[in-house]
Image (cartoon, rainbow, N blue to C red):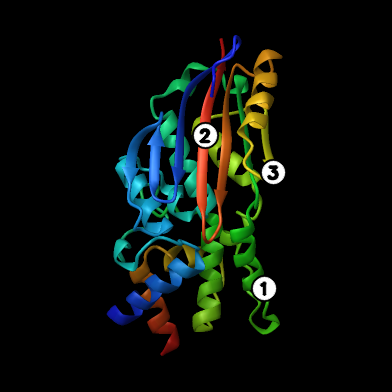
Amino acid sequence: MKDLIEQLKVQVIRQLNLEDVEPDEIDPNENLFAADNELGLDSIDALELIVLLDKEYNIKIKNAEEGKNVFQSLTTMAKYIAQHQS
Amino acid sequence: METTTTVQSLGSCSISQGQILHNQALWLEDKEQPFGKFIKHAYRQLDWHYPKFHKMDRLCKLATVTARILLQNGTLEEYNSEDIAIVIANKTATYHTDSKHIASIQDRDHYYPSPAVFVYTLPNILVGELCIQYNIKGEAAFFIQEEKNLPFLFDYSQLLLESGVAKICLTGWVEYTETHYNSELHLLKIN
């Protein structure tokens, strides 16, 4: 799980074009879309994360409600990927 | 910039190749750091929490930090939004980000255009970012020029100010390429 989270950090940085953010600057348990999150993610980034899951893990998010739960944090994303890939 | 009888300079900020000057005085210098680390260091020095900063492309980051250093004293807050103009120019528009977008759609078998990149493939977005940050709703323009030409920008700003279209104008040059970056912003007001 730890390796998957570290891999996700790199992929999220690349996918969201967070050009100058380092992986160790991302807290895997922090709410990705919280107003006070330094990354400042918005609805466009939510689309990008859906594309990331499809492109890198062949996982399709079925609806917005499911997406809201999956993308709460990098940890929830990693758990979802682990469940759906096994 | 020399002050004319009608237009006064309220300050300037420039960032170029690892050096930041505010009103001609050194604000930060590190010529060894690549742009990404340098601009992030400058952002942290501002002690300012702006969540959208990390999502911006490098051209917008350069403009944002330059403007923040120049405007953090709150001068623009004294003006009505509609009386604030913004006039910016550069040579390569958003070529650096355009190249990233093109790279993401080159391969037909792995065709994944990125909204996070695409949104910055227009130089007016830089103007938009600053308008959002400083509540600017007056005249806005972004010119593409062969070379940095501040006299032209100052003349254009003076026209806006003297004609009453604006009472204060943020103007200057913001350029980013893989090998070179340079920004110089000035705040001009009518006397």
Chain of the residue under the numbered disc 1 shown in the image: B
- Mark 2, Cα crowd under 10 Å, few <14 / some 14-19 / many 20+, is many
**Residue B106: percent from left, percent from top:** 68, 76
Observer able to see residue A59? no
Tag 3 near tag 2, CB within 8 Å: no
Chain of the residue under the numbered disc 3 shown in the image: B
Residue at figure coordinates x 31%, y 66% from the top left: A28
Position of B149 relative to B139 (above/below)? below
Chain of the residue under the numbered disc 2 shown in the image: B
Residue at figure coordinates x 44%, y 84% from the top left: A84
Please give the label number shown on residue B145: 3
**Residue A63: percent from left, percent from top:** 56, 68
Q: Secondary structure at mark 1?
A: loop
Q: Amino acid at mark 2?
A: Leu
Name the residue beneath numbered marker 2: B185
The mark closer to the camera, 3 or 1, is 3
Name the residue beneath numbered marker 1: B105
Locate residue B177: give its quadrant. bottom right
The mark closer to the camera, 3 or 2, is 3
- Report the front residue among A2 and A72: A2
Position of B18 relative to B100 (above/below)? above
Left or right of A28: which side holds B53? right
Left or right of B99: which side holds B13? left
Tag 2 near tag 1, CB within 8 Å: no
Q: Secondary structure at mark 2?
A: strand
Position of B108 relative to B100 (above/below)? below
- Report the front residue among B53 and B15: B15
Of labels 3 and 2, earlier in sequence is 3
Observer able to see residue B171? yes
Residue at figure coordinates x 36%, y 57% from the top left: B37
